[in-house]
Amino acid sequence: MGTKRSVSEQRGHPEPSTKRGRTARAAWTGVYERTFIAVKPDGVHRRLVGEIIRRFEKKGFHLVGMKLVQPSEPLLKEHYWGLRQKPFFSGLIEYMRSGPVVAMVWQGLDVVKMARRMLGETDPADSLPGTIRGDFCMEVGRNVIHGSDSVKMAQREISLWFNPDELICWENSSQPWRYQ
């Protein structure tokens, strides 16, 4: 029996502790910071994907990767590893497998922190109007969207959901109009 490998290792991604991973992380600062955003099955079924993309584009963030996926159970279990001891874990995995997910990578200055503000609180009842969850969600179990909560977590989540060749580096012509 072989050693158990993580989903990111199976996909050929370096683990965060590898030398290659440290080198890559050094570039994830300033206007090149990246975050992982996923529109959950309820957001896809409610046709909120376009509105969510619109909000990120209007804010000035740069889309570098996007795909519509039906996530596997192993991928979801690794993605939500930190919640595995919570009583709602199995229900969360079942819910996330109930329909397609739109996985995205956005890039920009302080994108992780700003995206979290745009999303609103995990519990929609605590989210302000104008946030994605404040405008579109009613309960925590159907909160439409996931966003990385730190740069380190963004790096981990992006490597779980995307192969390096699925992320496109392109020059956004509006960048000089957004940053000094």
Image (tube, grey):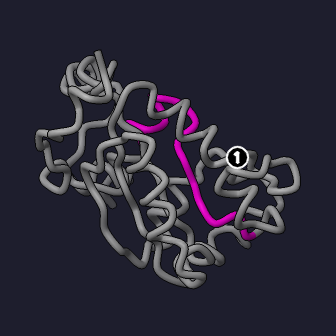
Residue 34 lies in the magenta stretch: no
Q: Position of residue 2 (x, y in %)?
A: 30, 56
The residue where tag 1 is placed is 120
Which residue lies at the image location 64% right of the left edge and 56% below the top edge? 132
Say which element carries label 1: loop
Write down the region rendered in magenta: 142-156
- State which quadrant residue 172 falls in: top left
Residue 152 lies in the magenta stretch: yes
Report whether 22 appears left or right of 69: left
Report whether 128 appears left or right of 92: right
Q: Position of residue 71 (x, y in %)?
A: 44, 72
Quick one: label 1, few (<14), some, or many (20+) residues within 10 Å?
many
Q: Is residue 137 visible?
A: yes
Q: Position of residue 173 (x, y in %)?
A: 15, 39
The residue lying furthest to the right in this view is: 125
Along the line of sight, the residue nearer the viewer: 14 or 139 = 139
Look at the picture and state if 132 lies above or below 82. below
- State which quadrant residue 75 falls in: bottom left
Q: Is residue 5 visible?
A: no
Report whether 90 appears left or right of 20: right
Looking at the rendered image, the quarter that the N terminus falls into is: bottom left
Look at the picture and state if 124 lies above or below 44. above
Looking at the rendered image, the quarter that the C terminus falls into is: top left
Which residue lies at the image location 13% right of the left edge and 42% below the top edge? 169
Which residue lies at the image location 43% right of the left edge and 59% below the top edge? 54
Which residue lies at the image location 75% right of the left edge and 56% below the top edge? 134
Along the line of sight, the residue nearer the viewer: 171 or 45 = 171
